[in-house]
Image (spheres, rainbow, N blue to C red):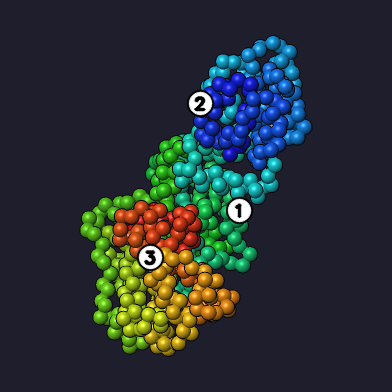
Amino acid sequence: MYNVWIVDDEPFILEGLARLVDWPSLQLRLAGESEDGLLALEDMKASEAAVDILITDISMPEMNGLELIRACRSRNPALKCIILSGYSEFDYVREGMRLGIENYLLKPIDMAELAETLRATVEKLNRARIDALTGEQVELVRDNIMYRWMNGRISAEQWEARAEFLGLKLDRPYVMAAVAAWDAAAGNPETGSSVAAGSMTEGSSAESIRFAAAAWLTQTGAPHLLFLDDNDRLVVLLGLPDASAGALEQARSLLLALGNELESPVGCSLRIGAGTAEQGFDQAPHSYRKALTSLGYALLHPEKMLLEYEEIAAASEKSTSLPASPALSAETYGRLLLALDEEALMAKISRDLDDLAGSSGVRPEDVRLGAAEMVLEIKRQVGDALQQGDLPPFQGAAADLYRCSSLAELKEQVRRIARTALQALGARQEQSPVVRQIMAEIQTSYMDDYSLKTLGAAYHINPVYLGQLIHKETGHSFSDCLHRVRIDKAMELLRGTGMKTHDIAKAVGYWDTAHFYKHFKKLVGVPPSQFRRLV
């Protein structure tokens, strides 16, 4: 937001402007008010706010508006100024124009004209900021604006104003959105070999992939816009002449060709979710949401590069039955775990997830929920067999499942957890008593205010050494262990209760809701509200 300062010797003008103008909707913040030019200079100097727009009266007792503008411009040449006056004399107007003011408004003030002047001034400030940026910085601004527009975080009016000076337009009557993501488990789905999440070939990056996509699409002549979302997924907006079968097939062929073009530099499997063709660019967010839905089905269709919303919707309509729960057999899982039969357990996990993914009418969230139930069953079986202090570090295990984007990756995640359980049951490695006690304590008292300093004092151990010991024996820092326990508990509350998010945050130990949101999204991959909708 930009800061505004109002100067007028009539208190009712100050009060009226402060109350009647919807400052936030104009991307503005009323930083201060003064009743005289000389006082305004002192007030602005004392204020911490950097003033971007000055709205000032002309006739004031100590220092008039024109003198105030000259004084302020000596400090800030880029300051934008709007004059209010009860005088329409030509000399005042001419001097104001010479000073480069944005407008000269006569009292009584026309609020619509003032609002329009402020909008135009904000756009000038925006354009000046863009002009001062490097090419890379401009791309970041474009990404941010487009991501916010697609997700409904700015109004249509704000989008139109920014799109104009950023050159964000397609000049086609129809638009289709597509979202491309890189499969983090593109190896053998049965052996579990995979590349690390988000990995690509050496020297590649989301930015370089975007650059390659832009160069290729430009070469084809297809009208398009590109941006990277906050998960570094590539979002493509294609301009279409109409929504005919021919135009849709051409778009489909283009997206498949783009996917094939990008798979080599990415170095792992590419998945593209395509939305529907929508009339009017203002409907692009609608197509984008459908594209994200389509991309989610990569979990069920690892063989497909392109997943189309129309095809997914048609398949869903044909199936009226609810998806079955995975064939979880507590006896089977318990027997395989206690027998330390890794081969049979890994096969059981793969078979259960394959069965669920192949169920009629199944959705990606159903498969993730089934995987979460497997993990909970494994944790329960291990918990029954071991002392509380001997339990392996399962913190965040369920949360990690919701970050998986393919069935192969989901299988590997559950198998990894199962191997951890087998290691704990087989080796029963003895943790140091203090770490065992602390891990047991935070499982039940996770809502308390913990730190290494307070724990060190409670257990009579140096805090630095304690932190090193916990990291060595759990593979995580103490704060990570605590956050993972808290977020696991928060997921249980989101799934099983109707509690409000801010109440859940407090219940699991976060008094700052923003802090809770940050750690939840970091560990789970989605905000709490979206997680609740998924489950």
Q: Residue at x 58, y 45 (%)?
A: 142
Above or below, 533 against 488 in this view is: above
- Which is nearer the eye, 327 or 78? 78
- Residue, far left: 321
Q: Residue at x 42, y 45 (%)?
A: 287
Q: Residue at x 66, y 12 (%)?
A: 87
Judge whether residue 231 can be spotted in this image: yes
Above or below, 143 against 473 in this view is: above
Secondary structure beneath label 2: helix
Residue 66 place in picture, x, y as percent:
73, 22
Q: Name the residue beneath numbered marker 1.
A: 211
Q: Name the residue beneath numbered marker 3.
A: 489
Q: Amino acid at mark 3?
A: Lys
Q: Name the residue beneath numbered marker 2.
A: 20
Q: Amino acid at mark 2?
A: Leu
Considering only order in the chain, which callout, 3 or 1, is on the residue closer to the N terminus? 1
Alpha-carbon span between mark 1 and mark 3: 41 Å
Residue 51 place in picture, x, y as percent:
66, 35
- Quarter holding residue 70: top right
Q: What is the crowding at mark 1: few (fewer than 14 residues within 10 Å), some, or many (at least 20)?
A: few
Secondary structure beneath label 1: helix
Q: What is the crowding at mark 2: few (fewer than 14 residues within 10 Å), some, or many (at least 20)?
A: few
Q: Residue at x 74, y 18 (%)?
A: 95
